[in-house]
Amino acid sequence: MTVHEITSSLEEWAPLAYAEDFDNVGLLVGDKHQSVSKVLVAHDALASVVDEAIREKCELIICFHPIIFQGVKRITNSSYVSRAIANAIKHDIAIYAIHTALDVQLDGVNKGLADALGLEQRTVVIPKQGSLLKLSTYVPEAHLISLQAALFAAGAGALGAYDECSFTNAGTGSFRPLEGSDPYVGEQGNRHLEQEICLQVVLPKHCKKVIVETLVQTHPYETVAYELFPIENVRTDLGMGCIGMLEEAMDEAAFLGKLKAILGTPSLRHSGLTGKKIARVALLGGSGSFAIEAAKRQGADAFVTADLKYHDFFKGENNCLLVDVGHYESEQFTKNTIIEVLRKKFPSFAVISSKTVTNPVYYF
């Protein structure tokens, strides 16, 4: 298999189109056409992880965090970033990062902890804005059904729990074919009037390219007029964080104890106890202080995340237990989630989990 074949399968699950603008996702080192016989999945592609890939004879490292995040001006042995890159290049090891493209997937970064806690009825905490677009085009009435079917098959028309959604409106289109044109109807030099249908469909942002290609290939006109623009509707399965219900409500001390046991951490930081049962739990792996208010608005009894600052803990305001479990700890199940997806897609392919612990934080 090639790097491209493997990473394209991941992008069907976590399209890079939904990664944050500040992020650096995708193939960071290597050739997408490179042949791969074994993949190493890691949290961070540090030099020690590259060494592990060399020992295990892996040609591709799939990592959560990108090793190249800001501009790299020189590749020497002067930093942990350049050492990892140089060693990967030297041994023809490709590095692919998925990061915030996976953060926004409901079955992504937060899935492992949500599964361990037994959260039910899961939705996202902050839906991803701009994830849906609307396409408007104009088609002769006789071709409406075939064009609709082609666009639906390409991924257009899905909205919430519905699919094959569209809107049509009849009208009259006009155009004059010029010299060099090959019109489907009408004659060069003469303005032509055609009874057309305005067809509108919604589509996920990451399907934009394939849906526009389908439109152009299926539409009978030589030159297709269409419009694309973002809409306010959002997907309930795409966005930051995860919120759901525990099977049974727990008191706060029991909930904190369960978290410690699941995460294997010696300590947790949390806001003042509220004195109420924990039933509705919000999760956001990594730095999640920006989502505190959103979690509270969705009725979270507890919000589990990382990297909270001193003043963040006041925002619990005695009605939501805020728990900082540590950055690495909150994301530690991500590696297993990626491996599950790859093994499901490629059951006979060699995918191994990195044994290198890349957590830079230690406890005394």
Image (cartoon, rainbow, N blue to C red):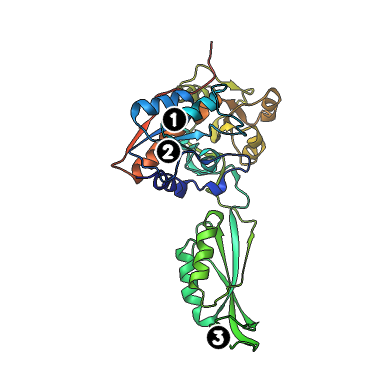
Q: Distance between the residues labelled 3 and 2?
A: 51 Å
Of 266 and 85, which appears nearest the observer?
85
Q: Give the residue at mark 3.
A: 185
Point out the tag, 1 or 2, that comes first from the N-terminus.
1
Instruction: Please tell me whether mark 1 or mark 2 is closer to you in this view.
Output: 1
- 240 left or right of 121? right
Of 60 and 105, which appears nearest the observer?
60
Task: Measuring from the top left, give residue 157's x and y in whole percent.
Answer: 52, 63
Numbered label tally: 3
Point out the tag, 3 or 2, that comes first from the N-terminus.
3
- 190 left or right of 264? right
The answer to whether the residue labelled 3 contacts the one labelled 1, judged by CB atoms less than 8 Å apart, is: no
Q: Residue furthest left?
A: 348
Task: Measuring from the top left, give residue 87's x and y in whole percent.
Answer: 46, 27
Q: Is mark 3 on a helix, strand or loop?
A: loop
Q: What element carries label 2?
A: helix
Of 182 and 252, which appears nearest the observer?
182
What amino acid is found at the position of numbered circle 2 in the picture? Ile
Residue 228 visible (yes or no):
yes
Q: Give the residue at mark 1.
A: 90
* Image disc number at residue 338: 2
Q: In this view, does 286 lie above or below 19?
A: above
Write the residue at 47% across / 47% down: 11
* Image disc number at residue 125: none
Q: Is mark 1 on a helix, strand or loop?
A: helix
Q: Is residue 51 above or below residue 217?
A: above
